[in-house]
Every structure is written in structure tokens, then in C-alpha cells.
Image (cartoon, rainbow, N blue to C red):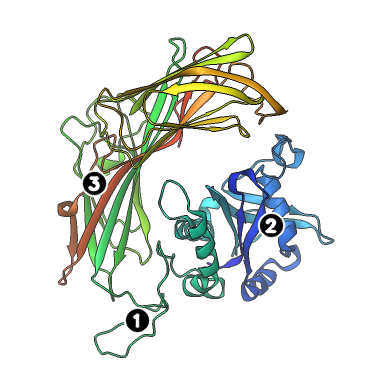
Amino acid sequence: MSVRALWIISHEKGEHLSLRFARRFATVEHRAKILAGSSYTAVPEDNTVLQLLLTELGLSDPDKPFVALRDDCLYRQRSPALELRVDSPGKGMLWPVLAISHGPITLACLPLVDAPAEPRPALASLLSVSQGLTLLAGLQTFLLGSGSKPDMEVLASRLAMLPSVLLQVCPLGTPLDVPLPGAPSTPTVPTHAENQKQPAWKTGLHRGRAAVNVALIETVRSMQYGNRSRQDLWDVYGTVTCKCEVEGVLPNVMVTLTLPPNGSPLQDILVHPCVTSLDSSILSASSVDNFDGSAFSGPYKFPFSPPLEPFRLCSYTSQVPVPPILGSYQLKEEETQLRVSVTLKLHESVKNSFEYCEAHLPFFNRDQFGVVDVKVSSGQLDVSKEKNLLVWGLGQKFPKSREVTMEGKISFSGPTPGPTDPLCTELTAYIKLYFKVPDMTLSGCSVDQHSVQVYSSSKQRIITSRELQSKEYFIWNSTGSAPVSSGQMML
């Protein structure tokens, strides 16, 4: 798999969008021209690509939510692979352009497709798509780190390092590895010691003690309405990622996941192709079927022969009885102002120790904030009048009562209109929660050093971790209308 081009776009705090980094690989582009023949579409200038990407991602003109070429029902978007229509003299389409966004940056790349353009191959059949997304995800982690809020100074320094990093991880446009989090070390020169083997796929030697790193991350989503006529929804999606750092031939490994005695069985389990054998009963549990209590409940053993790069060993879903944070949101019109009342309660089963926890309350389709007279029982409240946004920082712990409240009034009398949203009109409003809880999972699923076996004569360092994080965690205003789904939430 090779990459024809790579772009990094910055869009910090809604300011001017800019292209922070661009790299093209001439040898890969030459191969693309030979493979495509008469259907070849050249990659246009970077500024042109920037405008096409921003339009496709809906970032070019926030006040223009509908673009016919992008949003028309006849156009089938094939996420995560975007299709960019090039209006150059030769015209044509660039596909698949892969893009991922996080925080202040968007990363995009155009992988080389080693298949006929027509009929267009299925995304699932293209190895270049999964490898391209892996490269982008690795670069994203390198640039932004794993913290809750990206450090812009660190981002600027990492962008300056990126050319030398790409020489190591993606020489001549062919990804060989993903960059490690943190500042890259200086490329090392292989030694000629008899006991030292230089892997052909890596430009630098792994130095230090051999290690196996296993990380379990559960992501919870929720839609809470505070209304008996609407059913609250939540779901849990878990992933187990592994990275093996050893020299020479990688040993076979077995990772075991365990559940507490009263834990719900894992469902919808998908495994990496490197898993060598698996009990068929592990794959039988599905969230689509009615749960009858007879499903396999562990332990879940995954023996595998690890690939060279970090990879996702398995993923799963789990049914949990309650969401981790229960919320109530009431917004009422009182003459020329809004009365806000919010209650958030941390469930007793959730560890009261957060890496971060924030509640964002946006107010759309109104004038800018005037007077904001809002009090919180715990944490700190930040007011962004330009964005009509309240950011309630709850810190790393809820109080002993595990309940926090917000009460107050907001008037709107700013000189200019605030942000708009076609969905959030009148009293249709929401709170969005962002949180991460280290060393716990909502399902109770766990992995520790004793549950990882490495079949090797040399001693390995075993590193395990687990965490719970939120994604699309909404609490809707109970006094207004809200979007309701009759089906199961999909991650």
C-alpha cells in the first residue's frame, strides 16, 4: 500500500482554515498514472484540494448547510472514503480520499488503489483503505497526543518534526510503521553485532526491554430525553488494541478478557485476522437477538500471532443497565430570557475519578449572549459569548453526593446573531458531555498483566490499561422537542 498525497488542515476555534502540511510522493503518483491509464486524474494544487475537502466536510461555509453536489439524495457518500470532483481541464474524481478530524486538525490522504477504476471496488476489499486510516490515526495521535485538550504549542512543534518523522514511517509514500506518541527519537544506525537483527520493515531499531502493550477502551454513547414518552438510549462499544515491541521474530501471544460474576456477556465480537483460533460460542452473541441469558460469559481467550504494527485485536458491544451519568435538562422561556436548570448524577457503579469531565451547553439561532446569571454547585463555569456556549468544567471528581446542579437565567442582547443550527430551533436544545474515566469499564470487562501470556523464552514486560470515555453523549431539553430514534444506537 502506498500514499499519493497527505494533507493536514488546521481549524482551531473556528478561526481561518489553513493548510498546515502537505506532502506528495512523485514515485507513487507515477505508479497511479500507469495503473489508471486513460482514467487517470491528477492531484490538483494544494489550495484546490483544500477547498474541495472543506466543502465535502462541511467546513467551508457553515452558514450554507446544503450543497447540492454533496448533500443531494442521489449522491451516495461512502464514508470514510470521500469523493472529490476535480474541475480541472481533464476533470475527473479523486477517490478514495480518507479523512479523519479531531480537535483543531483534520488529516487526509489519498491512497493508491491497485484495482480497476470501473466498476468501483468495495471499500472492504481495499487493503489500502484500512492501512491509510491506520496511518492517519497514528499521525493524529503523534500530533495531538492522548490528552483531553490539544496543546497548540506542542502541535506546532510536532508539525515541524513531521517531515523527518515521515522519512521513518512512510519513506517514498509507503507506510511501514506509525509514529510513537511523543517526540521522535533520532534515527539510529543499525549495528553489526551478531545478536542484533534489524527488521526489514523498520528504519530504526527498537531499543529497550521487549514489551507487550494491551489497552482496553470502552466508549459510551447516550441520548437522554427526561420525558416518559421518549425512551432513553445508551450503548457501550469496546476495543482491545495491542502493540508488541520485540526484536526478531514476534512470539505468539494470548490475551484473556474477564467479566465480573454478574456481568452481561459481550456481544457482536469481531476479531483481527491474526487470531489463530477461537471458540465459536464467543462469536454467537448478537445485540440484534433477544438476550436469553444463555450466551457465553467468558473468559474470552484470544490467541494470536501479532503483526508488526499496533493493531485492534477485537471489538465488542455490551448491554449495561444504566448510563454512567444521568442528566436532567430544563430550558424555559421567561419573557426576554431563558431559565436554565440542569442536574447531573453520577451512577454509584462508576468510579468517581475522572481524567476530565465537561458539559457543553450551546444556544443556537439566537442573538449573542447578553447577561449570563448562572450558578453551579460544583466545578467551574466558562462563558463564551461569541459562540453562545456555556462550558461547565466538573473537574476530576463529583462531590460526595455524586450530584451537581446548574441554575440561572440567560438573556440575549448581543450586537450580532449567534451561531445557527437548523435542528436546534426554539426550545430544542441539548447538553453534550465529554468525560474519561481511567482504570474502569462500564461492562466490568478487564484485562491485567496475569491475563496476557507471551510464548517466548525471553522475558517480556506486560503493560495493560483500561478506560471509559464518552462519545456523542447528549442530554436533551425535556421541555422542548428532540430527535428520537426508534432503533438501536449504532457506533
| Residue at numbered disc 3 | 279
Sequence-earlier tag: 1 or 2: 2
Type of amino acid at the residue the image marks with label 3 = Asp
Q: Look at the image and tell me in which quarter the C terminus lies.
A: top left
Circle 2 Cα neighbour tier, 10 Å, few/some/many (<14 / 14–19 / ≥20): some
| Image point (68%, 46%), residue name | 56
User: Residue 313 — which label?
Assistant: none
As measured in the structure, the alpha-carbon distance from the residue carrying label 1 to the one carrying label 2 is 37 Å
Q: Secondary structure at mark 2?
A: strand
Residue 484: x and y in percent read: 52, 20
Which secondary structure, mark 1? loop
Indicate which label's residue lies in the foreground, 3 or 1: 1
Gap in angstroms between the C-alphas marked 3 and 1: 36 Å
**Crowding at mark 3 (Cα within 10 Å: few <14, some 14-19, many 20+):** few
Q: Earlier in the sequence, mark 2 or mark 3?
A: 2
Tell me the kind of residue under disc 1. Answer: Gln
Instruction: Say which residue label 2 marks.
Output: 94
User: Please, what secondary structure does the residue beneath circle 3 have?
Assistant: loop
Point out residue 205 in the picture as x, y percentages from the top left corner. 35, 78
Q: Are marks 3 and 1 in contact (CB under 8 Å)?
A: no
Residue sitting nearer the eye, 489 or 183: 183
Q: Is residue 409 left or right of residue 466?
A: right
What type is the residue that disc 2 sits on?
Leu
Q: CA distance from mark 2 to mark 3?
A: 42 Å
- For marks 3 and 1, the one nearer the N-term is 1
Query: Would residue 485 be seen by someone viewing this image from the given angle?
Result: no
From this view, report whether residue 217 is shown above or below residue 274: above
- Would you say 393 lies left or right of 156 here? left
Q: Which residue is mark 1?
A: 198
